[in-house]
Image (spheres, rainbow, N blue to C red):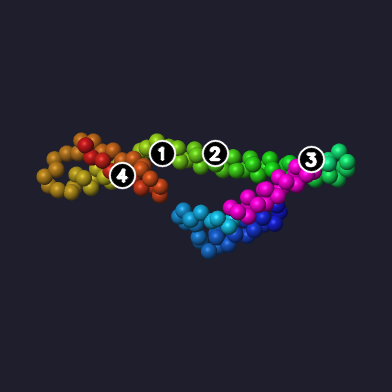
Amino acid sequence: MGSVNLVVVVESIRSIAAKEGDSLQKFHIPSIIAVAVALGVKFLLFLYCLSIRSKSSQVRVLWEDHRNDLYINGFGVIVAWGRTIYLEFELLAGKSAPHDFLQLIIYKSATFSEDIIKVDTVRAYHVRTHQVWRELWC
């Protein structure tokens, strides 16, 4: 588990140094597979140590270590997914555009043609990823 964590840290530092990741990157399957395999092996070791923990105090310590690693990694995944769900939920529900963006739409609408006398209502909301806003004029 430590080696997988080291690989994740090294790759994160490399990405930051190379200024990669400024926008959403494609899903990196090898990283997900490595972490999943490490968690699977940790779980199998946890089960094995669970079955023989009463025979040795060292095995009991290993069992507790595996248990704690699974708790911490499971908690980390839950927190990461919970944060993602929280941030994306308002976008899925149709989050309104920022005030500055609405002001820009009003300005561009009003100055588009001399035939436009006034702008009654402007609504803009989130419709997909990458903070793309869609304008609707009523």
**Residue ID at (18%, 49%):** 112
Looking at marks 1 and 2 on the same chain, the residue that comes earlier in the sequence is marked by: 2
First to last magenta residue range = 32-50
Gap between marks 3 and 4 measured at Cα: 55 Å
Looking at the image, is mark 3 or mark 1 earlier in the sequence? 3
Quarter of the image for residue 107 reads top left
The nearer-to-camera label among 3 and 1 is 3
Instruction: Name the residue beneath numbered marker 4.
Output: 134
Q: Earlier in the sequence, mark 2 or mark 3?
A: 3
Q: Secondary structure at mark 1?
A: helix
* Kind of residue at disc 2: Gly
Q: Look at label 4 and name its amino acid.
A: Arg
Q: Is residue 93 magenta?
A: no
Marks 2 & 3, CB-CB < 8 Å contact: no
Label 4 environment density (alpha carbons within 10 Å; few <14, some 14–19, many ≥20): few
> Which residue in the structure is indicated by mark 1?
92
**Residue carrying label 2:** 82
| Front-lying residue, 106 or 18 | 18
Mark 2 to mark 4 CA distance (whole Å): 27 Å
- The amino acid marked with disc number 1 is Leu
Q: Nearer the viewer, residue 79 or 105?
A: 79
**Circle 3 sits on which residue?**
50
Check the picture and name the quadrant holding the C terminus: top left
Judged left or right of residue 98, residue 47 is right
Rounded to the nearest angstrom, the CA distance separating label 2 from label 3 is 30 Å
Residue depth check, mark 1 versus mark 4: number of the one nearer the observer: 1
